[in-house]
Image: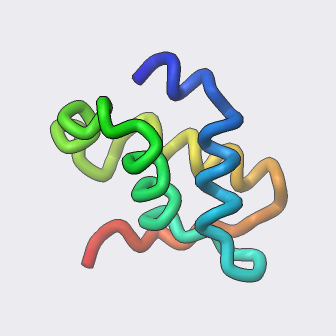
């Protein structure tokens, strides 16, 4: 997880995949990361929705001027 959190490139790719207009779907961004890094599934499942990865996605999206839709909960 630490390597992923330092890898802005993977997170930026996830944001690019999850963007609709000026809004980034946090749910879609995290799903994209999960497909790219299946080795982290157990760790992400254990952390739940409130985790450093979600915070990093929000932070990077905000730096690019995008709004984030917090749509993780159904």
The quadrant of the rendering that contains the C terminus is bottom left
Instruction: Indicate the colouring scheme.
Output: rainbow
Whether residue 69 sits left or right of residue 45 in the image: it is: right
Which residue is rendered at x = 57% and y = 40% of the image?
56
- Residue at point 23%, 47% (across, down): 48
What percent of the width, then of the height, locates residue 3? 51, 18
Say left or right for 64 vs 28: right
Question: Looking at the picture, does residue 33 appear above or below residue 38?
Answer: below
Q: Quadrant of the N terminus?
A: top left
Measured as percent of width and height from the top left, residue 6 is found at 60, 22
Of residues 49 and 39, the one nearer the viewer is 39
Image coordinates for residue 9, horizontal then vertical, percent: 70, 36
Q: Residue at the far right: name it.
A: 64
Q: Looking at the image, which residue is at 69% across and 68% down? A: 67
Image coordinates for residue 38, horizontal then vertical, percent: 32, 39
Looking at this view, is 6 or 70 the one in front? Answer: 6
């Amino acid at each position: 997880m630490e390597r992923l959190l330092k890898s802005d490139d993977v997170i930026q790719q996830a944001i690019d995949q999850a963007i609709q207009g000026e809004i980034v779907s946090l749910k879609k961004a995290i799903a994209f990361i999960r497909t790219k890094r299946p080795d982290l599934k157990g760790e992400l499942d254990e952390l739940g929705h409130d985790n450093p990865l979600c915070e990093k996605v929000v932070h990077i999206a905000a730096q690019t001027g995008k709004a984030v839709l917090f749509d993780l909960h159904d």
